[in-house]
Image (tube, coloured by chain):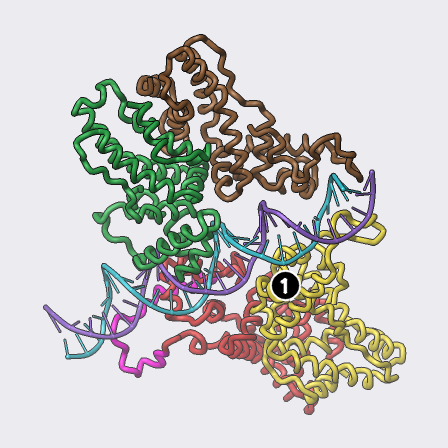
Chain colours: A brown, B green, C red, D yellow, E purple, F cyan
Amino acid sequence: MPTATTLTPVTKDSAETEARRRGRPRDVRCDQAILRATLDMLIEGGAVNLSIDGVAARAGVGKATIYRRWSSKEALVLEALGSDDSMIEITDTGTLRGDLDSYFEVLLQRFQADQGSDVLPHLIEAACYDPEVRRSLDEYTSNRRKPLLAALQRAKRRGEIGNNVDLDVLIDVLVGPFVYRRLLTGGKVDRVFIRKLLDIVF
Amino acid sequence: MPTATTLTPVTKDSAETEARRRGRPRDVRCDQAILRATLDMLIEGGAVNLSIDGVAARAGVGKATIYRRWSSKEALVLEALGSDDSMIEITDTGTLRGDLDSYFEVLLQRFQADQGSDVLPHLIEAACYDPEVRRSLDEYTSNRRKPLLAALQRAKRRGEIGNNVDLDVLIDVLVGPFVYRRLLTGGKVDRVFIRKLLDIVF
Amino acid sequence: MPTATTLTPVTKDSAETEARRRGRPRDVRCDQAILRATLDMLIEGGAVNLSIDGVAARAGVGKATIYRRWSSKEALVLEALGSDDSMIEITDTGTLRGDLDSYFEVLLQRFQADQGSDVLPHLIEAACYDPEVRRSLDEYTSNRRKPLLAALQRAKRRGEIGNNVDLDVLIDVLVGPFVYRRLLTGGKVDRVFIRKLLDIVF
Amino acid sequence: MPTATTLTPVTKDSAETEARRRGRPRDVRCDQAILRATLDMLIEGGAVNLSIDGVAARAGVGKATIYRRWSSKEALVLEALGSDDSMIEITDTGTLRGDLDSYFEVLLQRFQADQGSDVLPHLIEAACYDPEVRRSLDEYTSNRRKPLLAALQRAKRRGEIGNNVDLDVLIDVLVGPFVYRRLLTGGKVDRVFIRKLLDIVF
DNA sequence: GATTAACCGAGACGGTACGTCACGTCTTTAA
DNA sequence: TTAAAGACGTGACGTACCGTCTCGGTTAATC
């Protein structure tokens, strides 16, 4: 998930150092209520059925209060999702295969839980015409890759991966098939799939 | 692309065997005009800016005439896309590497031309809540995989690919990274990427 | 009710004298089914909820078969209503008061049964922009006045009504208040009303 | 015409006593523009050719802005008509015949100007299935009767009208024939008609 | 008996208007 | 200055009927 600063503040209140803005300060409870309502409605109806009007009503908040904080529905969604820290941690098992097993196990669960959700697809589409969303989505993706990258770097140091292998591309090869099946083919994603995938790559 | 029968007819006229539907038959020119208008507007403004009202106006057709044929905007888009036969043909070069080079060359052009388009992302999202779109999208994807599958089977027969390799998963490994970069990471997709990808897999 | 000839035939088959048109003759059962369906739907939902599509479906008839016979919804309604001959017969009681009592008794029942119906109002509106309906409605009204006119003429001959009284206007005075209450004031129409009305006029 | 409160506000702002509704107040210029456009279009094309889309476009206003204020086309029309204060004033001439002459003179002009208009008929029909319109139409009618009632009461006090005459019914007798001719018979409404009418009643 | 013209059902066709929804902005009062 | 409330113009939605127009298939009178 992108750090909150990427999308959140329409008006930057960059730091507390800044001489405390004048006028009534923003109510933090509003932020919370809005994000809470957003998450709830995302779970209930997906991103498509999420409307700003709906969130405002549910959060007991004026629409302007939302637009004051986020520039678009997607910015709001991205931040609402970001509040759950969903980064996959990879415990260093000492071997590449061990690390990957632990990683894919979690990834598998994520994908299965995620089935039917339209949140990611919605953001992907939104990213097409909203550069800000594009940036945030890239950052989100990038963050998710970090633990895997670390594990692969460890393996490279241990000599388990050839020196001439581009690790970024290797990640694409390992994660891409998941995304492809999930979004386009509707194919199954299970342990057998993972095993076959690893058999091919390594 | 799905064969026309998948999405097209809201009312199925399953076969010609059926004794010719009663009533005034549908005007084929309407189908053509609508699909033509849809494609034009897709190119001009993407899937998000495509409205049924707009298509109807442009095609010189009543809205009902569209809804009579397609149940949703996405069904319409899928068929409009399908009408251009965009399957990638792989000429049999005799070697796996040769086949793949020719395939990826075209795929690369496609991806670059496709950059910024929101059509595929839009369909992916639509597939989340419209099973009909889901089905058609799967079929579309499946068709696109066929030439590649054929090439890999030739290679397997020639012994270039191990007998225990699951070709379906291999395709996922070859194509998935493209999709992943295109939709999620925003990463570059070029010849260097392809070379590194093939280096890893083979 | 207007004689059928006023509105009914879009194409006039004025008389049997004409050398019997060629081609398949119109099916009388269609006329019946259509009028039947129209009456039923009028009773169920009023003139506003009456649609040609609906009548056609209910009568098991093509829409063209209706338009071949009647030029508009209202023409159809007028004829459907006309099939019940609803003229009020006044039995000659020998005195004006007796005749009027018998007449108003029936008129009263009609008005009460008619309450809530939108058929007459609908026709009145239609008459504004359809001269054919205008003509038919006038004729319909005119026919309804005839029995009353006859009774008044008898009374005039008997000397119960002054010689200088315009009987047409007298009918207006006797019937107008009914219509006025029914359509515009929403006021009660009962025996007391009739008595007071007659008290004023005579 | 009904006082504005009858139909106007979909959400009642019953009185000024209520502590000023929250949120952005309705723009009075919208009301004016909408009513203005409605009246114009009524004059041009009658009630049948009046569409909400048309009014919205002409008034330069969104459709929702209209629906926020009036629940139906007819409610809108009724209020638009009411904004022109069309009550007929009867100057006290001292004699019944004088008052009536002055009244009928204006009524006559109204009826002639009104010829061909479908507004009243349209409202009458609408009143059949919309109780709100029914109520407003009754109130409208009731208001229109008031001046006449006052004149008749003056005449009664002067002894020109018998004590046992029900003035409400008398009004029905005086006005009903007009309505009846106008709506149903298509008969002429002129000074001769009025004279004959008065000859009969008085 | 073949031809022919009008009829019939079904339903497609271009339109128009409907009433609803959500968008993102703006305008009020109150804190 | 922020907040809640909600009005605002915009524009698309999917539906319902309109009256007309093809279709294939009757059904008689005429040739």
Q: From the viewer's perspective, is residue B161 above or below residue B59?
A: above
- Could one spot residue C98 in this view of the protein? no
| Residue at the farthest right position | D158
Q: Is residue B43 left or right of residue D174?
A: left
Seen from the viewer's position, the closer of residues C55 and D133 is: D133
Q: What residue is shown at x 27% (from left), y 36% (from top)? A: B103
Residue E15 on image: x %, y %: 46, 65
| Residue at the farthest bottom position | C164
* Label 1 Cα crowd, 10 Å radius (few <14 / some 14-19 / many 20+): few
Magenta segment: C12-39
Residue F5 on image: x %, y %: 73, 44
Residue D60 on image: x %, y %: 63, 63
Q: What residue is shown at x 50% (from left), y 33% (from top)? A: A138
- Could one spot residue C48 in this view of the protein? yes
The part of the image, by quadrant, that contains residue B163 is top left
Seen from the viewer's position, the closer of residues D5 and C135 is: D5
Q: Give, as a three-letter code, the residue at label 1.
A: Gly
Q: Chain of mark 1?
A: D
Q: Secondary structure at mark 1?
A: loop
Seen from the viewer's position, the closer of residues B196 and C141 is: B196
Residue D80 on image: x %, y %: 69, 67
Q: Is residue C29 magenta?
A: yes
Q: What residue is shown at x 38% (from left), y 42% (from top)? A: B112
Q: Is residue B168 left or right of residue A2?
A: left
The part of the image, by quadrant, that contains residue B150 is top left
The part of the image, by quadrant, that contains residue B118 is top left
| Residue at the farthest front position | A163
Mark 1 sits on what residue?
Answer: D60
Q: From the viewer's perspective, is residue D85 above or below residue B200?
A: below
Q: In which quadrant is the N terminus of chain D drawn? A: bottom right
